[in-house]
Image: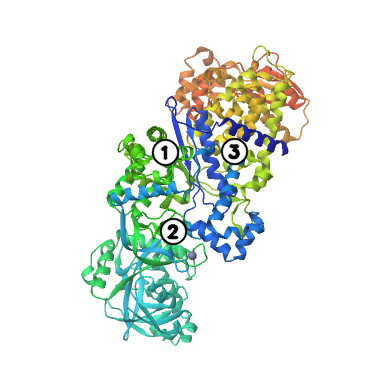
Amino acid sequence: MEFLRLIEEKWQKRWEEARIFEANPDPSRPKFFITVAYPYPNSPQHIGHARTYTLADAYARYMRMRGYNVLLPMAFHYTGTPVLAMARRLAEGDPELVKDFVKIYKVPEDKLKELTDPLAMARYFHEEIKEGMRRIGYSIDWRREFTTIDPQYNKFIEWQFRRLQKAGYITRGSHPVGWCPKDGNPVGQHDTVGDVEPEIGEFTLIKFRFGEWVMPTATLRPETVFGVTNIWLNPKATYVKALVDGEGWIVSQQCAEKLTYQNRSVKVLERFEGKALIGKAVRNPAVGSEVLILPADFVDPGNATGVVMSVPGHAPYDYVALENIKVDEARLREFGLSVEAVKAIRPISVIEVPSYSEIPAADVVRRMGITVQTDPKLEDATKEVYRHEFHNGRMRENTGKYAELPVAEAKERVKQDLIAEGKATTMYELLNRPVRCRCGTECVVKIFEDQWFIDYGNPEWKALAHKCLARMRILPEELRSEYVYVIDWLREKACARRSGLGTRLPWDPDWIIESLSDSTIYMAYYTIARHINAYGIRAEQLTDEVFDYVFLGIGDAGEIAGKTGIDERVLEEMRREFLYFYPLDSRHSAHELIPNHLTFMIFNHTAIFPENLWPRQIVTNGHVTMEGAKMSKSFGNIIPLREGLAMFGADPIRLSVLATAELLQDADFSPAVARAMRDRLERLYRLTVETLKGQGESSGEQANIDRWMLSRLQGHIARATEAMEKLVVRKAINTIMFDLDQDIQWYQKRVKASGGGVPAKTLRETLRVQVLMLAPFAPHICEELWEMMGENGFVSLASWPKPDETMVDEEVEEAESLIRSLLEDTLEILRATGITPKRVCYYAAAPWKWQVYMKALEMAIGGKLNQGILMKRLMEDPGLRAKAKEVAGFAGKIVEEINRTPHDKRQKLLKVGIINEIQALKDAEDFLRAELNAEIRLYMEESPQIYDPKNRAHIAKPWRPAIYIE
Ligand SMILES: [Zn+2]
């Protein structure tokens, strides 16, 4: 471990001294610009964060070795509530947070007070995160570092917002937003516990009448109002009578409070338990009939009004609740309900839908075997009925003027008509509630007045975003439909807050641009951050004209230089650098940023930049779990990155977070995996040291086994390269480390048995290539080995290997795989029989069998092999005709087998042709003797000198010698 640490420090220092990751424009080389979402410095990074960043770094390193001029920069996102909320919780002395800071993050206790200042906290963790990124060996060009509160960056964001405003993408008005009542701020995904995006839905409140009171039932399916059989109230929940905009309403207590956030004046008059109203009758405003109020525990007073209309014909929840209460006479009596009256309630069908009965809810409930209202399958049942009715349903005759209308249309018409007649209104509610703010408070929906929005609902803008997406490479491709969905679904997004760090809205400086809105095109800023840092360009010099010129080519550099005092040459240099590195080649983040950040990035690029500068690729990955469990501070299974690095080393951690999963899956980290990776790297180190000690420079002619090793190596290079091109990194690492290692071990065993000493030349070449391919993943140890091998320069800058076709020898590979499976088969027999062998005899197939086999393969290339046709062809040969019976017997055995063999394997075998099997066996004789610790005898089937006491030789097939053990 200690030696790994020394190697890491040594190479990190050398990289820094040689500045090899500082990328400048170089027109002679193709460029590749990679960015990862910059971190919020509100806590140190842990091993879970390492996945996205390490993936981007390994990709950057790979592309660098492929000859690209790679730029991988980094910055820090100080903006908004993530930092602010953390500092506030610390200031409030939140005991859990204090414990996390001291116990998990190892913040010195005397530092805590200082960190209650948001800026101090950001600075502190900024350094902490940066140090972690250095220690894990990311190939970052640190000259371009910035924070989102640097005054120069603020100027850039101001420019962006003025551009958006000019394009008509900024609106002001009243819109519903997710809201934290405690903070008095809108909440987005980055402000919530568990990073959930608040999803807002509009409920229709249908005004059922209870005397002079309104009981507004909340529904997402107003068209089913014609099928209402009763009302549900939660008997244990607290309800209120309140004046809502002057009208007397009965709603849950929570609802009364929520309505105040939606521009309603609410005056609560009286509180009571829901059970007080059970058994009373209310009038359905749509049809005029009266229905009973019944008790239901599934009614959540925290959801919308807490008053639910029951439509058992089309709502599985209602159907099950009604069936349940009908048979629960004790409960009916408890609430003083008439048993006969309740039992008489029948579901009313108002929608006709193909392939369902009158009562679709009943069909689905029965099919899913649901009997109680607490069954979680009810969610799926509800979704199914809703989906089918919405897409294929038609309103029945009993719905009056809506009869025959498709449900999708009726839904909207019923709602609008009821509202127009004063029989309904609307209310917003979170569809995925409860959503908690990071401060712990449950979020609500607020209609936000006079707020600034970015209008992602603009249809022309959506069209541009779709156009950009269509041209982009999305990895993994499976997620493309999610981007399509989000682009369609996005509406106005509140883009400014009253508090937090960040850039002030240029035309209304009381507002601060929030963190998902000031992080959409900053990749462009990296291309000029180097000049701003190096030339000491001040914020006041960065006028809109500067950005217009640098990013859009508008205006004259000389003139702008005169106005701003920025040297004309510097302005031109900035413009050139931007045009060299842009567009962005690859953007990296975790999947969860698709609904906001990643899609916002697409939108904003299309709004600001010309088409040729739109981003080209997005790569997202899943999370990291810890020994199968979700990583969470409350589980105590978070390992801060720097602690992990100290425990396991940088290269083992890099490999651990990448080798256990492909992009779509969650990766599972465990100390055992990290230690296993470390062991493998140490073994590679020892093997290299041994190999380099070996004398083998003039090993003379290559043996078959050397040709085999080098041929296999070409295949591994090809597979690893293909995997890296698609960022199928788990497969790449498996190929480079595990598959190649297995071959190396096999090769060593084979060579050792033949007494050939250390086969340095072949092994050196193999290890050299392995080190090259492993370098993007485990760069430190690979640099060390590269140097030990006497290679020039950094392995980080060496060329990624290309498979050498001239070294591919399929015959040698197939012959070796014959030996491999022969040994396995023999060992299997020994295991099964428990024999300790004195002698092992192998019988190679007779030449005529090869002749038959090749003919069969040849015919199988054209399609399915037919035994009759094969025999006809074989009998054209006089030699085979002479032994027709044996030929027929053998052909019968191989036809089925060849038909099962994959097409490409058949082609390969056909290409390799007839091999000298006896010779291949002879080459491996010493090896087999050593492995089996027995005398080895080799015979050709049908040879006169054969020793075959148990008559085994005749079962030999090409590529499958027969075995006899005694
Ligand atoms: Zn809050």
Establish if 223 lies above or below 788: below
Marks 2 & 3, CB-CB < 8 Å contact: no
**The residue under label 3 is which amino acid type?**
Gly
Q: Earlier in the sequence, mark 2 or mark 1?
A: 2
Q: Is the CB of mark 2 within 8 Å of ligand 1?
A: no
Pointer 3 local density, CA inside 10 Å: few below 14, some 14–19, many at least 20 = many
For mark 1, give the secondary structure: loop
Residue visible at 42% across and 45% down in the picture: 522
Cα–Cα span, label 2 and label 1? 26 Å
The spot of residue 8 in percent (x, y) is 65, 36
Cα–Cα span, label 3 and label 1? 23 Å
Which of 156/245 is in front? 156
The spot of residue 68 in percent (x, y) is 47, 29
**The residue under label 2 is which amino acid type?**
Gly
For mark 2, give the secondary structure: loop
Q: Is the CB of mark 3 within 8 Å of ligand 1?
A: no
Quadrant containing the N terminus is: top right
Residue carrying label 1: 584
Which of 397/311 is in front? 311
**The residue under label 1 is which amino acid type?**
Leu
Residue carrying label 2: 188
For mark 3, give the secondary structure: loop
Residue carrying label 3: 137
Marks 3 & 1, CB-CB < 8 Å contact: no
Residue visible at 74% across and 35% down in the picture: 833
On the rendered structure, is 793 left or right of 361?
A: right
